[in-house]
Image: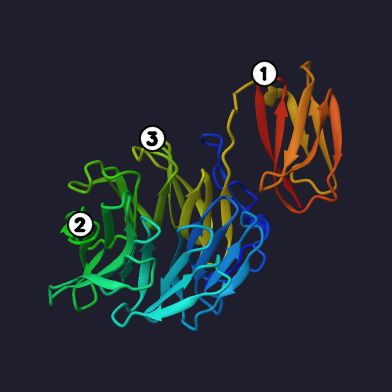
Amino acid sequence: MKTRNSMFLLLFFLFGHISNAQSWYLLPTANGLDEETEDVFFLNPDTGYVAGWRINNISKTTDGGLTWTPIAGFGVQCMQAVFFTDANHGFATGCGHTVAKTTNGGTTWVTETLPNLNTGMGIFFPSPNVGYIVSNVGIIFKTSDEGSNWVNIYQNSNPNIQLSLNEVCFPSPNIGYVVGGARNYSGGIDSAVVLKTTDNGNTWINKSPNLPGLELQSVYFLNDSLGYAVGQNYILKTINGGDTWSFTIDSTWSLGDIAFKNENIGYAVGNNIILETTDGGLTWQSSSYNETLTAICFSNNVGYIATYSSQILKNVPVSGIESTDVNKVIKVYPNPVSDELNIEVDGIIEDLNFEISNAIGQVVFKGDLVKKAIIKTSSFAPGIYLLKLENGKTIEFKKIIKV
């Protein structure tokens, strides 16, 4: 069992550099979150859900991950996946043949048992009415009436092979992809599995790459043709809708999920690792982390990573940064800070305006800087803050840690 890290175990920055003016940081407290987390889904940068193990299978945040409220326990060991189509309508699936639905943002849930589901591993709704669930026994279920009824639309017909389907993704209403692994009855993994539909799930085509011994855990498509899949030590990429797959990385890390902000910037997560690409998967930079990272998602360019021991990492975009000499002449100390922060000009520079924002973007302090400013921070809550410095021409950002 993994143990929770204290705040200071993450107060090194997960990336030694800031790529595209971004980095991941641990939310100082994930109050109320106690799942062994399997999935994370954010409807918008403030409102999100996690699914996992323990009594409370689903928890919800409305403040960007700072606090969490347990909202559902279904009497099963785990919920593996959660998906919301709007602020009210959400769905979850997991152990015990269970599918759950809410129509009021998670306040109440109605559960259904699908006899052949076993464990639902992934769920995706390309439209409010139409959704898909994949299971660990190789079955795909579909609803066309907003989850009122679920129909078995695909089942493995080869008696010598057992399919394990782990994730489903629809880049458009008609075109979808499912990934997993083909197992032999001795329990071993025979090969990776990729299934594709181009007719709204009516038929499924085998697009599996020839990768013996590899089980794919997650799939992410940016459009109908461009997609990625991860499994164990590999990241695969296709640019032609799964007709061919190429390795973008062959590593020693065990990977479990992948998500992209745009065609260039993406992240893969797994056991003790975050991988980042800024060139569409041509190269990947690694950052180690002392935890198993289970799931990743983006909402309006704000990213969230969930860990197995209920930690939440956040990635907030910072736009408009220019590389200037401001950074060379500004001193910010001490950092980490407890009671008093100093911002000091070392040299001659124009007057600066500055502001300090918390992890969810709220401005907690602002002022003007001529030579030196001293800010009382004793009332600031512990966590990560962003210092913005502006002289009317350029903007510079610095991270501050409040302890």
Q: Secondary structure at mark 2?
A: loop
**Which residue is labeled 3 in the image?**
279
The reply to whether dot 1 and dot 3 touch (C-beta < 8 Å) is no
Q: Position of residue 24 (x, y in %)?
A: 56, 47
Query: Is 157 drawn above or below residue 314 in the view shown?
Result: below
Q: Position of residue 200 (x, y in %)?
A: 25, 57
Query: Is 71 drawn above or below residue 12 in the view shown?
Result: below
User: Callout 1: 10 Å neighbours few (<14), some, many (20+)?
Assistant: few
| Dot 1 amino acid type | Lys
Disc number at residue 41? none
User: Callout 2: 10 Å neighbours few (<14), some, many (20+)?
Assistant: few
Mark 1 or 3, nearer chain start: 3
Residue mark closest to the camera, 2 vs 1: 1
| Dot 3 amino acid type | Asp
**Which residue is labeled 1 in the image?**
393
Mark 3 or 2, nearer chain start: 2
Horizontally, residue 283 falls left or right of residue 291, namely: left
Residue in view at x 85 percent, y 28 percent:
372
**Which residue is labeled 2 in the image?**
211
Q: Is residue 232 visible?
A: no
Compute the Cα span from label 3 to label 2. Answer: 25 Å
Residue in view at x 67 percent, y 65 percent:
31
Q: Is residue 96 visible?
A: yes
Query: Is 237 drawn above or below residue 35 in the view shown?
Result: above
User: Residue 205 appears in which quarter of the rendering?
Assistant: bottom left
Q: Nearer the viewer, residue 335 or 38?
A: 38
The reply to whether dot 2 and dot 1 touch (C-beta < 8 Å) is no
Q: Position of residue 225 (x, y in %)?
A: 26, 43
| Dot 2 amino acid type | Leu
Compute the Cα span from label 2 to label 1. Answer: 53 Å
